[in-house]
Amino acid sequence: MTFLHSCQRAAELISQSLDEPLDMVDKLRLRMHLSMCGNCRNVQDQLNLIHKMGGQIGTIDVCDDSADVPLPHGNSAG
Ligand SMILES: [Zn+2]
């Protein structure tokens, strides 16, 4: 089994893994790389976050009208 030689390739696999399941081999390679490369672990965190937010990214900036979202802390004292 060959290791990932470049962070570039690792980033590609990370990105790819968000869209589709990786091959077993690719998955292992990526895990190996992440286990010794903190930089790529950060990249993975970032990409995971972005991926989780997904379509929400487009709506965050434009919620001027729809401000009727209940606040998490219901302070009803009064
Ligand atoms: Zn790396």
Image: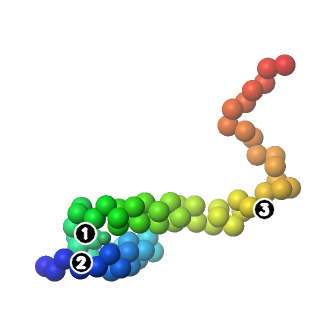
The residue that disc 1 covers is: 33
Q: Is mark 2 within 8 Å of ligand 1?
A: yes
Quadrant location, the N terminus: bottom left
Give the residue type that dot 1 points to: His
The Cα–Cα distance between marks 3 and 1, rounded to whole angstroms, is 39 Å
Q: Is mark 1 within 8 Å of ligand 1?
A: yes
Q: Nearer the viewer, mark 3 or mark 1?
A: 1
| Label 2 neighbour load within 10 Å: few <14, some 14-19, many 20+ | some
- Which residue is at the far top? 78
Which residue occupies 69% across, 67% down?
58
Residue designated by label 2: 4
Q: Is residue 25 visible?
A: no
Give the SS element for disc 2.
Answer: loop
Q: Position of residue 3 (x, y in %)?
A: 19, 77
Q: Secondary structure at mark 1?
A: helix
Report the residue at 24% width, 77% height from top: 4
| Mark toward the start of the polypeptide (1 vs 2) | 2
Which sits in the foreground, 6 or 57?
6
* Figure quarter occupied by ligand 1: bottom left
Quarter assignment of residue 8: bottom left
Is 11 above or below relative to 37?
A: below
**Quadrant housing the C terminus:** top right
User: Which three-letter amino acid code belongs to the residue tagged 2?
Assistant: Leu
Q: Which residue carries the number 3 mark?
A: 62
- Residue 7 sits in quarter: bottom left
Q: Is 51 displayed left or right of 43 in the figure?
A: right
Sequence-wise first label, 2 or 3: 2
The amino acid pointed to by label 3 is: Val
